[in-house]
Image (cartoon, grey):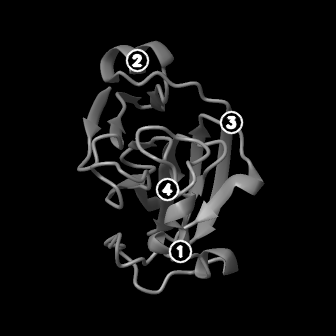
């Protein structure tokens, strides 16, 4: 298994060993001890989510504030462009993003830690995305950030995505600064003075 930090070092691209033969393939998606020993990532994964989206769909950018979630993302059908954005005020990489193409063919995973927003867009006819998270979903603690916020400047590979009404109306990063977590801590943010 290969762990490669991205331009935002806390976001890690994971390339598992895939064993193929005439019957198909086998891979280990997550192994707690190996991840801790080889990448220094000690994870407690508590929930597993699965979504299906059609071509051109963009989901995100989403984050949890009261119960921050780290996400281990993989695409099991089709192809997506997956993105993490550092939203921790005071972080040296605040507002920066890193992304990778994940697909059923390349078997890659992207680790997006707590204190980061996450989103993806579908590049194939359809895509199924599975992601394990480090904390249970908290609907009241969720925030959205505009997918096309110029301050973040994500280089999305699609120009006119299909968005949910909530994602289409999401605020820019600068509009919610006082709600964001403070670096290095994650969780309920301190009150802005």
Give me the residue at 66% from left, 42% from top.
Answer: 67
- What kind of element bears circle 4? strand
Viewer-closest of 174 and 45:
174
Q: In this rendering, would 168 be left or right of 101?
A: right
Give me the residue at 62% from left, 45% from top.
Answer: 188
- What kind of element bears circle 2? helix
Asked if residue 14 is positioned above or below residue 120 in the image, the reply reads above
Q: Nearer the viewer, mark 2 or mark 4?
A: 4
The answer to which of marks 1 and 3 sits earlier in the sequence is 3
Which residue carries the number 4 mark?
Answer: 117
Other-residue count near label 4 (Cα within 10 Å), few / some / many at <14 / 14–19 / ≥20: many
Asked if residue 93 is positioned above or below residue 16 in the image, the reply reads below
- What kind of element bears circle 1? loop
Which residue carries the number 3 mark?
Answer: 47
Q: Position of residue 169 (x, y in %)?
A: 62, 81
Which residue carries the number 2 mark?
Answer: 36
The answer to which of marks 2 and 3 sits earlier in the sequence is 2
């Amino acid at each position: 298994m290969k762990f490669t930090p991205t331009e935002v070092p806390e976001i890690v691209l994971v390339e598992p060993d895939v064993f193929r033969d005439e019957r198909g393939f086998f891979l280990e998606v997550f192994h707690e001890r190996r991840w801790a020993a080889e990448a220094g990532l000690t994870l407690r994964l508590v929930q597993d989510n699965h979504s299906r989206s059609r071509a051109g769909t963009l989901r995100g950018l989403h984050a949890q504030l009261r119960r921050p979630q780290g996400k281990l993302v993989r695409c099991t059908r089709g192809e997506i462009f997956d993105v993490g954005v550092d939203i921790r005020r005071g972080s040296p990489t605040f507002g920066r993003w890193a992304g990778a193409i994940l697909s059923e063919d390349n078997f890659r995973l992207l680790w997006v830690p707590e204190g980061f927003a996450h989103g993806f867009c579908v590049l194939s006819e359809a895509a199924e995305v599975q992601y394990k998270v480090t904390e249970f979903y908290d609907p009241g603690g969720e925030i959205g950030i505009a997918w096309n916020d110029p301050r973040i400047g994500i280089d999305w590979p699609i120009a006119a995505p299909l968005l949910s009404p909530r994602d289409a109306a999401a605020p820019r990063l600068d509009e919610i600064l006082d709600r964001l977590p403070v670096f290095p801590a994650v969780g309920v943010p301190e009150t802005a003075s």
